[in-house]
Image (spheres, coloured by chain):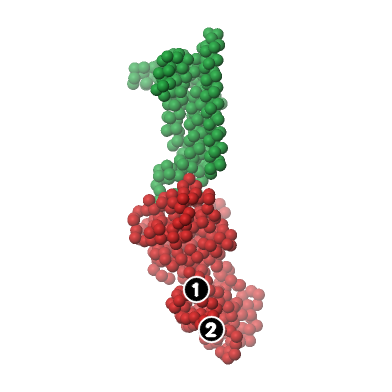
Chain colours: A green, B red
Amino acid sequence: MEILHSWSENMPGLGPLWLSVKLGLVTTGILILFGTPLAFWLSRTRSHAKTIIEAMVALPIVLPPTVLGFYLLILLGPNGAIGSYWLKLTGETLTFSFGGLILASILYSMPFVIQPLQNAFESVSRGFVEAAATLGARPLDVFFTVVVPLGARGFLTAAIMGFAHTLGEFGVVLMVGGNIPGQTRVISIAIYDHVEAMEYGQAHALAAMLLMFSFVCMFALYFINRRWRHDH
Amino acid sequence: MTIEAGHATVALNRPGFTLDVDVRIPGHGVTGIFGPSGCGKTTLLRCIAGLQQDARGSVGFNGEIWQNSDRFLPAWQRPVGYVFQDARLFPHMTVAGNLEYGRRRARVAPELASPDDITAMLGIDHLLERRPAQLSGGERQRVSIGRALLRYPSLVLMDEPLANLDAARKQEIMPFLERLHASLKVPMLYVSHSLDEMIRLCDHLIVMDAGRVLAQGTLHDVLMRTDLPMLGGREASTVLDVRVLDYEPQFELSRLQFAGGEIVVPGRHGDRDFPLRLRIMASDVSLCLERPQSSSILNILPAVVESLQPEAGGYVLVRLRVGSVHVMARVTQKSSMALNLAPGQSLFAQIKGVAVKSFV
């Protein structure tokens, strides 16, 4: 991480990459942290609210990024419901800042983290949960000693999907974040910029980097999934 | 019935199924819950374990209330050891990890059997490093029994632990269960639809059908309830608990003592005072008015007729008193008329065959 950061000081092309990686890591971390209880609840509940929440979580998959970005711009702007509150609290605006970008990414990548987690939790047989309970494990204990280890593949899928998807976002960032170097100029924006400025060389370099990185992510995902299936 | 340690009075409604039972849980020994598939045996066990949150009613054990109208103790707080039909070993842990799981969470550190004793008794000490996927069905079920026992429960619940196993695997596990029966200090509820398993393992019996309890009491008494369809007819039998008296090597016969006298069976079955359980099919008992002087049958016991119950197919079930126990005989209607059988009559029962059920 530190190495990447010091490189980015010297090599201007790496700045946007580092920003993208940082955004991906923070977004994925927050989504796993808060998405896990939500996904677990969705996997176990019989509440009627389940369907509504599932539909809301899935919305970013079908929504054009511009629509999501537009609403976020309004909501996070200095006069928006969240943006004005943030401004009062910190004295800074949420739009066109890294913080705003994180918020936008969380919403945008949510389904890619929640859905694998929910699937993983649903695939953990109730039988094991019951067995753990009759062995004296309280619900939180059961969750960490039985549900999480048996759903570990789901966590891995969620992390890789969330991270890779955040890395590839463009439309939402453009709407909410703009193009501020070191703040909101992530790799996909930088590529767009270079193409606009006819700097095809730099665009090539960044695009190839993103392509390779995405392939490695997907390869890792399928590779680990396959090994896992053989183990269990 | 013996001193009871608990009760379960539970009701549960589901589309197409209603459970409505009131059972007493004896304070020691194995209590069988017997009945056809789908009669609610497993559901009853789940209600006692706290796995059925939609059950209404009350459950109590050892003076503690596990459930009533304003209290529902969650499963993890009930000191039960549950053995599931499908073992349910945690696939991400080794056998040792599975065994440890309940022990680390046990409420008290008891002076019951040590972990080493339990793994040795179940014959699983050589499997500790393996994963559940590497075990045979029989081994998996033994580990599952060990895991439940190492939770040091005050009540063991077993849900058809042999149901998913083939005949050979059943034979593999049965001796462990019988050994458990002899050494277990806490009561056990054992669900099965096999009468043979019940007769080998249980001291008490609860008979269920269609979500209701038809009979409950000691095994011996309940088996006398020939009015119950699953216990009458060809299945009608008597269970006797006996002790070994001696062995005659010359004839390879064992003399056994029970509360109604003595009985002789082929083969050697242990030393003096060794406890055994016998099952005598009612159709293997014939009756004669005088003691037969020359008969190939070894076991001829004086008996008194207590009651007669005609059965379909031209048979009569005769309930006899032999000493202080009951024995059932199944004879044809014709023989019954010929002998002029009536309650209070003294006669002799000839026992053609005896099955020794406990090989500990």
Q: Is residue A196 above or below residue B184?
A: above
Q: Position of residue B347 (x, y in %)?
A: 55, 87
Q: Is residue A69 above or below residue B307?
A: above
User: Tag 2, which secondary structure?
Assistant: loop
Q: Which of the 4 quarters of the picture holds residue A141?
A: top left
Q: Out of B245 and A27, give the one closest to the viewer.
A: B245
Q: Are marks 2 and 1 in contact (CB under 8 Å)?
A: no
User: On the picture, is B224 further left or further right than B69?
Assistant: right
- For marks 2 and 1, the one nearer the N-term is 2
Q: Which of the 4 quarters of the picture holds residue B6?
A: bottom left
Q: Is residue B343 above or below residue B92?
A: below
Q: Residue at x 61, y 80 (%)?
A: B331
Q: Residues within 10 Å of mark 1 (few under 14, many from 20)?
A: some
**Chain letter belonging to callout 1:** B
Q: Residue at x 41, y 20 (%)?
A: A5
Q: Residues within 10 Å of mark 2 (few under 14, many from 20)?
A: few
Q: Position of residue A61 (x, y in %)?
A: 54, 27
Q: Is residue B272 visible?
A: yes
User: Tag 1, which secondary structure?
Assistant: strand
State the CA–CA distance, disc 2 to disc 1: 24 Å
Q: Out of A16 and B116, give the one closest to the viewer.
A: B116
**Chain letter belonging to callout 2:** B
Q: Position of residue A232 (x, y in %)?
A: 53, 44
Q: Disc 2 residue type?
A: Gln
Q: Residue at x 40, y 58 (%)?
A: B116
Q: Which residue is mark 1?
A: B277
Q: Which residue is mark 2?
A: B250
Q: Disc 1 residue type?
A: Arg
Q: Is residue B129 above or below residue B62?
A: above
Q: Residue at x 51, y 56 (%)?
A: B139
Q: Position of residue B161 (x, y in %)?
A: 51, 59
Q: Is residue B322 visible?
A: no
